[in-house]
Image (cartoon, rainbow, N blue to C red):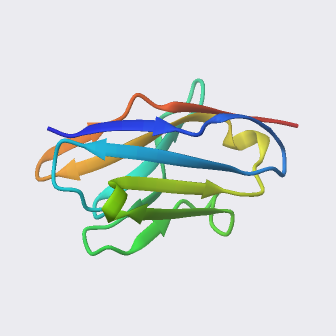
Amino acid sequence: QVQLVESGGGLVQAGGSLRLSCAASGSSFSIKRMGWYRQAPGKQRELVAAFTSGGSSTYADSVKGRFSISGDNAKNALYLQMDSLKPEDTAIYYCNKAVGIYVYWGPGTQVTVSS
């Protein structure tokens, strides 16, 4: 079992920054196969950024150059630095981890970007 809890969301003006954190527990921690997804109202959940099974990072085209994913194995934590935020980044952001055939999700944290 893996438990994930996101934090760091909030209300920010366009052009601002936020740093999301995901605290993981319950399993041997590795940033591999961990990532961030988001879901805006009326839209499907989409990948924002993730670490692959090989440990490399991948980003959605819409956030490239603005968002950065990182992790700290010693702290069992995953981060998402979000800069130059836009109103269209408004969504609930979820932390995700795949372990074998199982996929775990956190409850999400709301990010709202005002124009």
The number of numbered badges drawn on the structure is 0
Q: Is residue 73 left or right of residue 103?
A: right
Q: Residue furthest top?
A: 42
Q: Against 93, is 20 above or below? A: below
16 lies above or below 106: below
Query: Compared with residue 91, is residue 49 higher up or lower down, i.e. above or below?
Result: below
Instruction: Determine the residue positioned at 40% across, 28% down.
Output: 107
Residue 29: name its quadrant. Answer: bottom left
Which corner quadrant of the image does residue 1 belong to? top left
Q: Residue at x 42, y 63 (%)?
A: 71
Q: Position of residue 22 (x, y in %)?
A: 43, 45
| Residue found at the far right of this picture | 115
Q: Give the left or right position of residue 59, taking residue 66 as reference.
A: left
Residue 24 position within the rendered picture, expressed as x and y whole percent measured from the top left: 31, 45
**Left or right: 67 as drawn, with respect to 107:** right
Looking at the image, which is closer to me, 76 or 45?
A: 76
The part of the image, by quadrant, that contains residue 23 is: top left
Left or right, residue 64 beside residue 58: right
Q: Residue at x 18, y 42 (%)?
A: 26
- x%, y% of residue 84? 78, 56
Residue 88 x %, y % = 72, 41
The C terminus, quarter of image? top right
